Every structure is written in structure tokens, then in C-alpha cells.
Amino acid sequence: MELSDIKKDLKERLSKKRYEHTLGVMYTAAAMAMCFGVDVNQALLAGLLHDCAKYLTDKEKLSACKKYKLPISPMEDANKELLHAKIGAAFARHRYGVKDEEVLSAIACHTTGKPDMSPLEEILFIADYIEPNRKQLPGMEEIRYLAFHNLTDCIVQIIENTLKYLEGKKSLVDDTSQATYQFYLEKQKQERIS
């Protein structure tokens, strides 16, 4: 499917606000891709499709997981919102015909991140957080600066902010987010040494 066809389809499925966020992520990911020498078309496609399953109800998410044989962790079962990323990757493959494994992987991990992400995965993870339609979160100015200067530092800052936010709400932290944070803290240390 062409990007224009996917846009038309998503505009009908997503709320106006979610669709605007989607376009913001798509263009932010493309700008970051240009900055870091990552394939711009991959970034556009991943950005456009990252929330393509966001409109599903919890019941529909569970049904989609069953249909596509997607495992559900205890954390995802407790917070079904997390499921939209892996379902989005399945939709990208089956509904929109995406065959690029790197794009599919970026969509699948854009919410929690994962240890040792590829540059495209890092870009989508960051673009989802910093796109221009996002409300001004604490430290956003610095995070947006880092997004175009140092991906590792940016990811550490985003996860620290997210952990503080979740702790403030007394919410559980996903194990993958925790593992991602530990990986990027260590990577940050190594980058500062070398």
C-alpha cells in the first residue's frame, strides 16, 4: 500500500487527535532519520503505522492477539493499552502489507522500547514522545534537543521521565521498559568513557 492510501485508511479509523499525533510522529521520525542517516522511507512508514491499532477496545485487542497468535505478558494483561504496539505490527504486516522486518519491529517496540534497539527503533520510540502535538511535558525542551544530537541520552531521559510519571501515579512499570532503561544507562556510561 502507498503512504497516501494508508493515510486515508487511518484517517477513517483513528480519532482526529490520534491521527494528528500519527502525522506528527511520521514527520518527526523522518526528520530524525535524515539527521542520523537512517532510511527516511522506513521512518515515514513506521511513524505512520505506529498507532494503527490504537483505536481498538480492550476486548478487540484481546481478540486480535488471539487471531495473530500474539503472546500476552502479565503486565500487558493488566494494562491492555500496551498491546496496541504488537497488534499494530501485526496490522502493518497483514492489513497494510508491510514486509520490512525492521519497520515491523520498530512498531512493535515503540511503547516500551527494548534493550539494544536499532537506530530506526530508537527514532520511532523518541518521535512518539517528542512530536510537536504532544503536550509540553517536564524536560521536553531538552529531550527534543537531545533527539537530534544524542539518541542514547535522549532515550535515557525519556525513560527517566516516564518512570517518574508512573511512580507518581503508583502504576506498575513494564519489565521491558525497565530492561531498556538499564541497557541504555549502561550504553550511556560506555559512550562517555570512549
Image (spheres, rainbow, N blue to C red):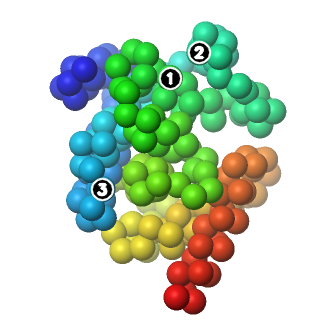
Q: Earlier in the sequence, mark 1 or mark 2?
A: 2
Are dots 3 and 2 in contact, CB under 8 Å? no
From the viewer's perspective, is 61 left or right of 46? right
Q: Which residue is mark 1?
A: 90
Q: Which residue is mark 2?
A: 68
Q: How many numbered discs?
A: 3
Amino acid type indicated by mark 2: Tyr
**Residue 25, percent across and down?**
35, 45
Q: Earlier in the sequence, mark 1 or mark 3?
A: 3
Q: CA distance from mark 3 to mark 2?
A: 29 Å
**Residue 116, percent across and down?**
57, 58
Amino acid type indicated by mark 1: Ala
From the viewer's perspective, is 76 left or right of 107? right
**Residue 34, percent across and down?**
23, 59
Q: State the residue at coordinates (49%, 27%).
A: 88
Compared to residue 193, the image places residue 40 above or below, namely: above
Q: State the residue at coordinates (31%, 36%).
A: 45
Residue 50, quarter of picture: top left
From the viewer's perspective, is 125 left or right of 75? left
Numbered mark located on residue 38 in the image: 3
Q: Looking at the image, which is closer to me, 164 or 88? A: 88
Q: State the residue at coordinates (53%, 55%).
A: 117
**Residue 135, percent across and down?**
43, 53
Q: Is residue 54 in view?
A: no
